[in-house]
Image (cartoon, helix red, strand yellow):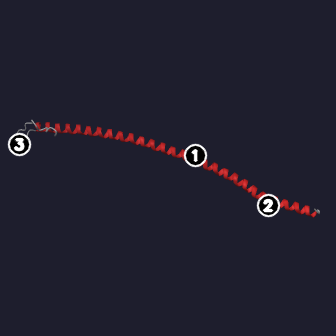
Amino acid sequence: MPPKNPLDGLKITGDKGQWNDWSNYVLIALTRSDESFDKLDASISTLRNALYAELATDKEKARDAVSALKAEHDAALAEIKLQIAMLKIKAGVWGALAGLIPALTTIAIALLLQHAGNGG
């Protein structure tokens, strides 16, 4: 339904009407505009508040996601550090064994030569 025309029922006299009559029209139009602006301002405020609330929620969700990713990263990093430490130990053991073989061979040869030199 279209808004009520503020000129309905207004009696304008003369060619251009009396200022008194026109002032009523202007006052009605200004009042209507003011009410429309108030409604518009309230709508904007409501939308702004809803947007801020949604942004705050999204910010919290993002913060939670980043925290979860950091926890996963820290756990993976700890696992990698543990595996590196285990590999270092294994490398040390294999290195010791690899060094032990020539040492034992040398000792065995020396004992054989000593035994053979004694007339064995």
Q: Position of residue 101 (x, y in %)?
A: 78, 59
In the rendered image, the residue lying farthest to the front is 120
Residue behind mark 1: 75
Whichever of callouts 1 and 3 sits on the residue coming sooner in the sequence is 3
Q: Position of residue 61 (x, y in %)?
A: 45, 42
Which mark lies nearer to you, 1 or 3?
A: 1
Residue behind mark 2: 102
Q: Residues within 10 Å of mark 2 (few under 14, many from 20)?
A: few
Front in this rendered view, residue 107 or 5: 107
* Residue 110 horizontal side relative to residue 85, left or right: right
Front in this rendered view, residue 14 or 1: 1
* Residue 9 horizontal side relative to residue 49, left or right: left
How far apart are the alpha carbons under marks 2 and 3?
126 Å
Instruction: Please name the residue shown 70% across and 51% down the image.
Output: 89
Instruction: Please state which amino acid type lies under the numbered disc 1.
Output: Ala
* Residue 60 horizontal side relative to residue 71, left or right: left
Quadrant where the image shows the N terminus: top left
How far apart are the alpha carbons under marks 2 and 1?
42 Å
Front in this rendered view, residue 89 or 12: 89
Whichever of callouts 2 and 3 sits on the residue coming sooner in the sequence is 3
In the rendered image, the residue lying farthest to the left is 14
Residue behind mark 3: 15
Asked which secondary structure carries label 2, the reply is helix
Which mark lies nearer to you, 2 or 1?
A: 2
Question: Do residues under tags 1 and 3 come within 8 Å of each other at their CB atoms?
Answer: no
Question: Do residues under tags 2 and 3 come within 8 Å of each other at their CB atoms?
Answer: no
